[in-house]
């Protein structure tokens, strides 16, 4: 049996603090730059876009679950898949920065859609390896997958409704 130093609850708190800082940054930028008003007042939105507070709380929950999954893989993961899973989850946090840049800072619904599309593909790939590294962390990734899938659909609809994108039968 390997005797190695695995992260304690302190590292989980650090991961959660970093995730909370990231969600605070996104929320602060969204309100400070007026993107909230842009989305809810100026853009055509799909009927299933939830109210802002629900959207915010779900995004915070998703980010905190990702941090918990990262810690779980770090603490209990095994083999090479542990390291690959940790890299994948970290890349998911960076993918959020891509969406932040495209949608919130540039205010471009198309760039936001493509950023969330990349995030969706990365989520699927990460889920495959996270489940191999640690089953509990793999289960934690399902809400992340659900959220990313929902936001992919929302982003597509925002792009379709606001760029004149016409699809056959839609």
Image: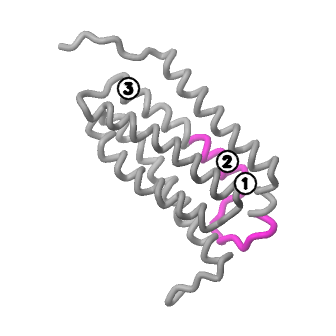
Q: What x and y, as percent, mark residue 35?
A: 76, 56
Please determine whether, in this image, residue 160 is positioned above or below residue 55.
Answer: below
Residue drawn at x 72%, y 73% is 44
Answer few, some or many: residues within 10 Å of disc 1's Cα (few below 14, many 20 plus, some between 14 and 19).
Answer: few
> Is there CB contact under 8 Å for labels 2 and 3?
no
**Tag 3 secondary structure:** helix
Residue drawn at x 50%, y 37% is 65
Please determine whether, in this image, residue 161 is positioned above or below residue 32.
Answer: below
Label 2 – label 3 distance at C-alpha: 27 Å
> Is there CB contact under 8 Å for labels 2 and 1?
yes
- Mark before the other along the chain sequence, 3 or 1: 1
Is residue 68 rendered to the left or right of residue 14? left
Residue annotated with mark 1: 52
Image quadrant where one finds the N terminus: top left
Residue annotated with mark 3: 74
Please determine whether, in this image, residue 106 is positioned above or below residue 5.
Answer: below
Residue range of the region highlighted in magenta in the rendering = 40-61
- Residue nearest the viewer, comparing 140 with 43: 43
- Mark before the other along the chain sequence, 2 or 3: 2
Label 2 – label 1 distance at C-alpha: 6 Å
Asked where in the image residue 164 lies, by quadrant, the reply is bottom right
**Tag 1 secondary structure:** helix
Q: What x and y, as percent, mark residue 95?
A: 52, 48
- Residue nearest the viewer, comparing 6 with 64: 6
Whether the magenta-drawn stretch holds residue 56 is answered as yes
Q: What x and y, as percent, mark residue 19?
A: 58, 33
Residue drawn at x 49%, y 19% is 11
Residue annotated with mark 2: 56
Answer few, some or many: residues within 10 Å of disc 2's Cα (few below 14, many 20 plus, some between 14 and 19).
Answer: some
- Count of numbered circles on the image: 3
Is residue 156 rendered to the left or right of residue 77? right
């Amino acid at each position: 049996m390997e005797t190695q130093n695995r992260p304690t609850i302190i590292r989980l708190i650090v991961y959660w603090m970093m995730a909370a800082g990231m969600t605070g940054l996104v929320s602060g930028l969204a309100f400070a730059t007026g993107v909230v008003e842009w989305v809810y007042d100026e853009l055509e939105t799909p009927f299933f876009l939830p109210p802002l507070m629900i959207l915010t709380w779900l995004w915070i929950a998703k980010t905190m679950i990702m941090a918990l999954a990262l810690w779980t893989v770090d603490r209990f993961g095994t083999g090479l898949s542990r390291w690959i899973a940790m890299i994948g989850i970290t890349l998911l946090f960076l993918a959020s920065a891509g969406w932040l840049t495209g949608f919130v800072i540039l205010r471009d619904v198309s760039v936001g859609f493509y950023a969330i599309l990349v995030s969706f593909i990365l989520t699927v790939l990460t889920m495959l390896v996270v489940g191999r590294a640690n089953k509990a962390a793999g289960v934690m990734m399902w809400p992340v997958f659900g959220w990313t899938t929902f936001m992919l659909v929302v982003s597509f609809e925002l792009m379709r409704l606001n760029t004149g994108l016409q699809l056959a039968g839609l």
